Image: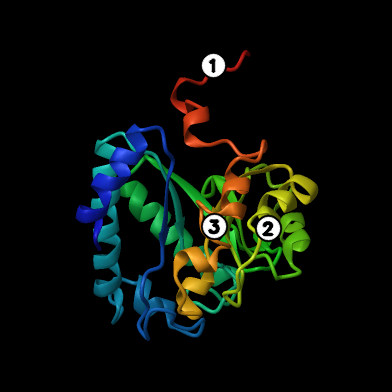
Amino acid sequence: MIWRELNPVLIDYWKKGGLVELHFHPIGPSGILGTPKENLDAILNSDGAFNATYMALLDQAVAGLKNLQDNGVVVLWRPIHDFAGPFWWGGSPDRHRRVWKHMFNYFKGKGLNNLLWVLSCHPSGQHRAYWAGPQYVDILGLDWAVDWPTFDRAVAGARGLGKPLAITQSGESNGKIFDLNIIINTIRNRAPEVTFFIEFSTGVDFAGVGWDQSIGSGPSGPSGSALMNDPWVINRGEIDFRNTPTPRP
């Protein structure tokens, strides 16, 4: 964990009016990605062979999150993402719900109360099947690449559960340059209830190109500037969410 180096940046950003989102991808017994065939008893049970390692990871996360809590920072917390994906916590609704509830209850027992829990899919519309229940989830996320024909199905699967929706990963799955306006145009035309989006380019990881080249000339480039100045996008300097008026009864 690098929270001691990371948190000062997050705290400063929060104090300047920003929102903090953290994605947590804990390692499994067979590596970073793991496999849905991992033995969960070995990971989650107190006598399991990998339990001490896994709990140490959780404790490091707790320490970092508690430091943010002590500084008044609310965190959009997106752990064990892509619930139907190829990672060790995936494979079936029962597996994912077990890992999710274990982490949620452990963090709650440690006194953390500054987290908004974000459940994100890959790229199916199976939120209803995978989520642990309304008391365990605050926001439903869609992990979506602009070249995947799965957006409408994912949105349909997340609707009707009484939780806000967000695009929690977006990019181009093959690492190609694309027009960032696709993101906000998709929200505007096909899912106007989406509350926020996160640009995540797999091109950085797999194509070996720089961030600017992988997201369409970068945030300061033509498409990035157009995206951030679109009338549907609210930037940090345009809202003070800490002083929002109390809703009328």
- Tell me the quarter of the picture where residue 67 sits: top left
Q: Identify the residue position indicated by label 1 in the image.
A: 246
- Tell me the quarter of the picture where residue 41 sits: bottom left
Amino acid type, residue under disc 3 in the picture = Glu
Q: Identify the residue position indicated by label 2 in the image.
A: 128
Q: Nearer the viewer, residue 79 or 212?
A: 212
| Chain-order first, disc 2 or disc 1 | 2
Q: Is residue 213 above or below residue 206?
A: above
Secondary structure at badge 3 equals strand
- Tell me the quarter of the picture where residue 47 sits: bottom left
| Chain-order first, disc 2 or disc 3 | 2
Q: Position of residue 92 (x, y in %)?
A: 60, 74
Q: Position of residue 5 (x, y in %)?
A: 21, 55
Q: Is residue 15 above or below residue 106?
A: above
Could you tell me how far apart the alpha carbons at marks 2 and 3 are, in whole angstroms? Answer: 25 Å
In the drawing, does residue 183 fall left or right of residue 71? right
